[in-house]
Every structure is written in structure tokens, then in C-alpha cells.
Image (spheres, rainbow, N blue to C red):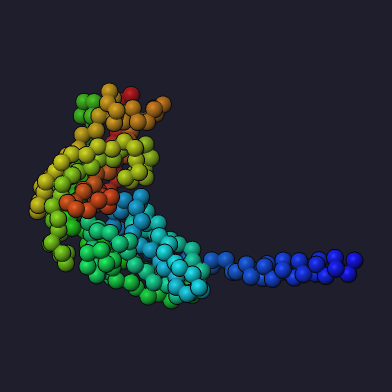
Amino acid sequence: MKNIAMISIAILMLVLSSCEYDNYDEPSVVFNGRLTTNGDNFLYDGNQGVLKVIQKGFGKVDNGIYLRVDESGKFQQLLFPGEYWLTLNNVKYPFEFEDFHSLGSGLGYDSLYMNINSNITKNFEVKPYFNISNFRATVEGDNIVLRADVAVNTGTRETPPRVIFARGYVGTASIVSSRNACTKSKRAVITTTGSVEVTIPIHNDVVAYRTIYVNNFRDYAFCRIALELDGIQNYYLFSETVKVEGVPQ
């Protein structure tokens, strides 16, 4: 009987110590902000991670938490109070951050120390290698045609790579990113200035708007155009999102 009582006490102490060990405070501080270019919102993909925070110490290896940046360049992340390092994913981008310089090919980027013990807002200036302007979408026959003007940004540290593809994205909702299933690309070699055009069929094609979005009775669609630069995969430069009316059933 005495042995059973001793075992029960030992188990109870183990349970209580485990509860105390796991009883951490919940994340309580908000880190938010936006990516900007010339003071305006930087129009982003919304489907790719770019900024990440790393918290060191506590006997752990922290690979970082990606801050979800939406299509308008805004981000918001709930964090534990503490010391963090903010950096970029170790890949090439079609844009440059003023706060993060490349350390060399394959070596990653600068890290920015941040002591976050209360809610904080911080914006980051971005310089795209190319600027997209005058983006428009029209219905022409059985196609949605996307057009935009493109000009090189001469204010970047590195020499901009050339544009190799223009990519069109069409969806049924106002949030459009590279995640959208209805896409099409066209080779578009631009070195300094020029225009791009991508034609997306509405019917009778495997990538057509009505083929991808079945049982869709909307007579409108939301569209974006993006630029792929030479040697930079998965990260593109995006236009604003526009709504096109009069899409035939």
C-alpha cells in the first residue's frame, strides 16, 4: 500500500512539473508594416515568402518564421516578446531591399536586429528592377487580353536582368497571385523599355477561363500581369489587380 502511495505521489509530481514546464505565455506582440516603393505600396505576389524573423537562444535551432506579405505589400505577425533577427529568404529576387544587402551569391542577405517587446510597425522600401504601368485588361472576341508598359528602374544597386516572360493571371476573386490556376505566359524580351501582352482564352482551351473555373456564371474576372526576369525563378514582378467586365458565358 505504501509503495502504491509513493508511486502515485511521484506521478503527480511529474505531471505538475510537466505542466509548469509547458506553461509559456502566449504570443502577445504584433509586428506589422508594409513593403513600399517610392512611398506607395509595393505590389507583391502574395504567394511567396520573403521576409522572415529568427529568434535565437532558448537551446533551439530556429529556421525562421515567414511573414505573410499580401498582394498590396502589407504584413502582420503575432510574436512572442523578445530579440529577433529579420532577414530575407536566401534566393535571388527581381527587386532589392534598401535594408538588406546581398552578401554574395548563395550567402544570403544582411540581418536586421530587432528587440520586439511591444507592438511595432515598420515599413521596408523595395526597388523593383522593372516598373509596370498602364496595366489594362479587355475582352476581345473569345479572349481576355492583358497589356502593360514596362520600363527598367535605373535606381537599383545591381544591373537589372532582362525580362524573359510576361505572365497573365485571371481569377474569380479580387485576390490574384501566382497561386491562381488560370494562367498563361508569353516570351517577352525587354531590356530597358517596352510593352507586354498576354492573351488568355475564355473557352475551348485547357487553360481557358471557363475551363478552369467550372460552374462559374460571373460575367467578370480579376486580372494581373507579372514579369519573370532572367535567372530568377518563382519570384515575379506584379502589376495591380484590375477587374474586366463583359466576359461571355
Viewer-side residue, 246 vs 152: 152
Residue 168 appears in which quarter of the rendering? top left
Viewer-side residue, 31 vs 41: 31
Q: Is residue 62 shown left or right of residue 14?
A: left
The percent coordinates of residue 109 (x first, y second) are: 28, 68
* Residue 32 seen anywhere in this rendered image of the structure: no
Q: Is residue 181 shown left or right of residue 92?
A: right
State which quarter of the image contains the N terminus: bottom right
* Residue 241 seen anywhere in this rendered image of the structure: yes
Q: Residue furthest right?
A: 1
The percent coordinates of residue 222 (x first, y second) are: 32, 39
Q: Is residue 46 above or below residue 197?
A: below
The percent coordinates of residue 141 (x first, y second) are: 21, 25
State which quarter of the image contains the C terminus: top left
Residue at 83% in and 70% down: 6
Viewer-side residue, 178 vs 62: 62
Q: Is residue 56 above or below residue 148?
A: below
Residue at 50% in and 73% down: 59
Residue at 11% in and 48% down: 190
The percent coordinates of residue 157 (x first, y second) are: 16, 67
Q: Is residue 180 above or below residue 45?
A: above
Residue at 30% in and 58% down: 41
Residue 19 appears in which quarter of the rendering? bottom right
Q: Number of numbered discs present?
A: 0
